[in-house]
Structure formats: structure tokens, C-alpha cells
């Protein structure tokens, strides 16, 4: 994960990221995305919930290891000065499909990440088991049927971005049909 300074970007800059996010393509223009922007104590409260969830896990060993796991969960929302929770809410459009709403919301997250880089911020997309936990959804004012697509950590980078993650060459992943290459 990109290391972020704890200096918080201003609300106008975060709004710029959100404005980019809502330009994502979506079938039927139903705008399924919702954004919950957390900073300060709101991140700490989310961390307490993560810690409570971890401490209730069956099979978590007793002792220092247990405490380390719980503390790591508590610190997750503090990785950056801003956490933007991006959720997809089912829409009422008669032709809308739930998977398309989630896909459109994922496109909104990608737009947000690109906008962050464009304005000199760093952002990291995370999910994990908390994204699928109804207790987390309820804490954030979401419903069971809503889908948390991303926890986006946003802030100013501490250092240059790490090198790109190795990927399979595109030629190994692509089949061209109707082309003469």
C-alpha cells in the first residue's frame, strides 16, 4: 500500500475527486454509487468497529498474537487522512441489473483514483472482509443489500509511488478477431 502523510486534503479537493467519480459510465444513467467520506474521529470509530469484529472472531488465539491482530484491525482506517467508502445501492430502474450497478460503481472508483493522481494525491483501493460485513454497512448507514465496492485511502504521498506491479503481457491476454496484425 502507498504510504500517506497524515496531512488531510481539503474538502474542495476531495469534492473534485467525487465529481470525477460520478462521471463514470453507467447503464440507464441510474447512478448507483454512494460516497461516505471519513476523516478524523470518524476513521477512529470505524477502526474500533473493525477491532470489535476481529476480537469476536472464533479461533483467534489468546495472548500477544490476538492483541496484535486486533490492534492491526483498529489501525486500518488510519492508513490515510481520508477514507472514502464507495458503495453501490440497487436502483429502481426496471432494466437495471445489480451486477451492472456494482460494475458502474467500480468504474466510479477508478475515476476517483485517476483524479487523485491528477491533483497530486495518492489513493489506494482496498476491500477485504469488512466490505462484506453487515455490521460495517450498518455503521456507515448502508443497508444489507448495498455493496461496499471500495475503501479508498486518500492523502499526500510520503514518497514516490512504488514501481508498477508486474502484469501478464497484454498479448497473452488478448485475442484479436477480424484484425490483420
Image (tube, rainbow, N blue to C red):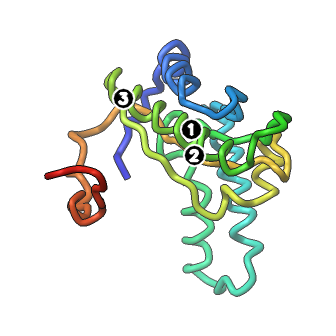
For disc 2, the marked residue is 151
Is 110 in front, or is 173?
173
Foreground mark, 1 or 2, reads 2
Crowding at label 3, few (<14), some or many (≥20) Cα neighbours within 10 Å? some
Label 1 with label 2: CB-CB less than 8 Å = yes
For numbered disc 1, what is the local secondary structure?
strand
Crowding at label 1, few (<14), some or many (≥20) Cα neighbours within 10 Å? many
**First reached walking from the N terminus: tag 1 or tag 2:** 1
Q: Label 1 to label 2, Cα distance in Å?
A: 6 Å
Query: Residue 83 shows which numbered tag?
Result: 1
**First reached walking from the N terminus: tag 1 or tag 3:** 1
Is 148 located above or below residue 6 in the figure? below
Is 68 in front, or is 115?
115
Query: Residue 66 shows which numbered tag?
Result: none
Question: Quadrant of residue 108 in the image?
Answer: top right
- The image shows residue 151 at horizontal and vertical percentages of 57, 46
For disc 3, the marked residue is 121
Query: Could you tell me how many numbered marks the image carries?
Result: 3
Amino acid at each position: 500500500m502507498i504510504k500517506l502523510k497524515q496531512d488531510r486534503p481539503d474538502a474542495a479537493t476531495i469534492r473534485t475527486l467525487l465529481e470525477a467519480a460520478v462521471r463514470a459510465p453507467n447503464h440507464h444513467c441510474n447512478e448507483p454509487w454512494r460516497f461516505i467520506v471519513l476523516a478524523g474521529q470518524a476513521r477512529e470509530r470505524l477502526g474500533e468497529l473493525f477491532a470489535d469484529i476481529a476480537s469476536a472472531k472464533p479461533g483467534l488465539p489468546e495472548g500477544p498474537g490476538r492483541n496484535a491482530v486486533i490492534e492491526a484491525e483498529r489501525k486500518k482506517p488510519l492508513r490515510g487522512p481520508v477514507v472514502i467508502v464507495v458503495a453501490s445501492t440497487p436502483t429502481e430502474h426496471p432494466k437495471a441489473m445489480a451486477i451492472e450497478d456494482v460494475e458502474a460503481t467500480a468504474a466510479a472508483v477508478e475515476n476517483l483514483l485517476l483524479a487523485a493522481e491528477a491533483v497530486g494525491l495518492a489513493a489506494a483501493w482496498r476491500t477485504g472482509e469488512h466490505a462484506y460485513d453487515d455490521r460495517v454497512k450498518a455503521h456507515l448507514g448502508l443497508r444489507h443489500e448495498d455493496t461496499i465496492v471500495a475503501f479508498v485511502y486518500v492523502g499526500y504521498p510520503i514518497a514516490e509511488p512504488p514501481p508498477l506491479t508486474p502484469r501478464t503481457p497484454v498479448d497473452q491476454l488478448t485475442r484479436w478477431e477480424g484484425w490483420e496484425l
